[in-house]
Image (tube, grey):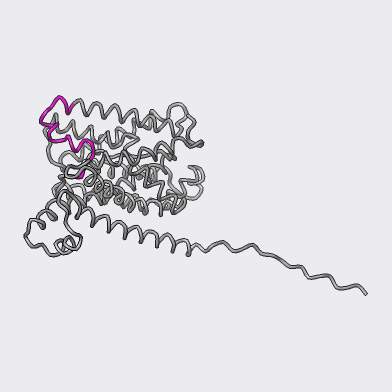
Amino acid sequence: MRSPLPSVITVRPAAPARPRGRRAVRRAGLIALVAVLAVVMCLSVAVGSQHVPVPTVLRIVFAPDGSAESALIHDLRVPRTLLGLVVGAALGASGALMQVLTRNPLADPGLLGVNYGASFAVVCSIAFLGVTSVGGYIWFAFAGAAIAACAVYALGAAGGGSPARLALAGVAVSASLGAATNGFLSLNGTVFDQMRFWDVGALAGREFEVFWPVLPFLLAGAVIAVALGPSLNALALGDDAGTGLGTRVNLVRLLGAVSIVLLCGAATAAIGPVTFVGLTVAHIARAITGPDNRWVIAYSMVLGPVLLLASDVLGRVLVRPAELQVGIVTAFLGAPVFIALIRRDKIAKL
């Protein structure tokens, strides 16, 4: 008598990790980064040519007592720190947004000339029109940022528009605008005295008179960037795939451009041109979260102020009692990242 056929054992593949678990990890990581940001903000208020202990900082921030330390903290360091917070978030969000919209891993507001376009327009408004307030020249910053972005994209798109070619076009436009800006400053001593620290990117000396005028534009740009997150995921698949998924590609690109101009124009009007922040934090965020642009933008908006404020604190410590401007420090920190990225095989070819 024949033995019965053996039963067939079906081996099922392991179930993929639940999206909820991944979201929980991303959420926990974001909370941890917010805690790191809080620590860096405390250090930003405490550290400087005159050191103030952190417990004293926490006490004075919530209960001013009229002392010299209280005046130092409330009149100088708190505005400086808050401005670093919002500008860092703006640079981080705009960097992540630019990399998705241009499909260029080298995209950065400073490297692609956007910040330098805003800077050039601001200097021209001061030199030729006598504009002196942030509320006055911020509109010129928006116009300069938009024109520079269009010029870089037009130059980079010629001949195939590879990521490295677009980056080189941005470097060329940035260098040209930077030289023109320095030329105006050298020919006008009054403007030079006003703008010499601003032109290299500086948080020093910024008070609430600078913070409040730029805040609405930074918030508007940030809201647009966050709202575009789901659409950017579809756009990253390609224009045809995005359209097939119901995404209005042209509208997404237009809103993304508006967000970038608002964020970069307001940030540059506030503290001057700062490079490499958007480039660096967007890549760090993507390495942590993966390709989901909703999380990349959120992480970039936290990592941006962490990097900017940490660079500002480092600039105060390295040459104490003098200071290195934050734009110089971020350039030193970000340049190796840029070199490493451009040497990658997949983007090194022109």
**Corner quadrant of residue 122:** top left
Whether residue 95 appears in this view of the structure is yes
Residue 308 location (% of width, % of height) = 28, 47
Residue 270 appears in the rendering: no
Describe residue 214's horizontal placement relative to residue 302 as left or right: left
Residue at point 84%, 70% (across, down):
5
Q: Is residue 66 above or below residue 237?
A: below
Q: Where does the image place residue 257, in percent across and percent down from the top left? A: 34, 41
> What residue range appears in magenta?
184-203
Indicate whether 163 appears above or below 87: above
Q: Position of residue 157 (x, y in %)?
A: 42, 30
Q: Determine if the magenta segment contains residue 266.
A: no
- Residue at figure coordinates x 16%, y 44% from the top left: 321
- Quadrant the N terminus occupies: bottom right
For the image shown, how many numbered marks are present on the structure?
A: 0
Image: 21 above or below 194: below
Q: Residue furthest right?
A: 1
The answer to which quarter of the image holds residue 278 is top left
Of residue 241 and residue 166, the one placed in the foreground of this image is 166
Please tell me whether the stretch drawn in magenta is mainly helix, strand or loop: helix
Residue reaching furthest to the left: 66
On the image, the x and y values in percent for residue 76 come to 14, 50
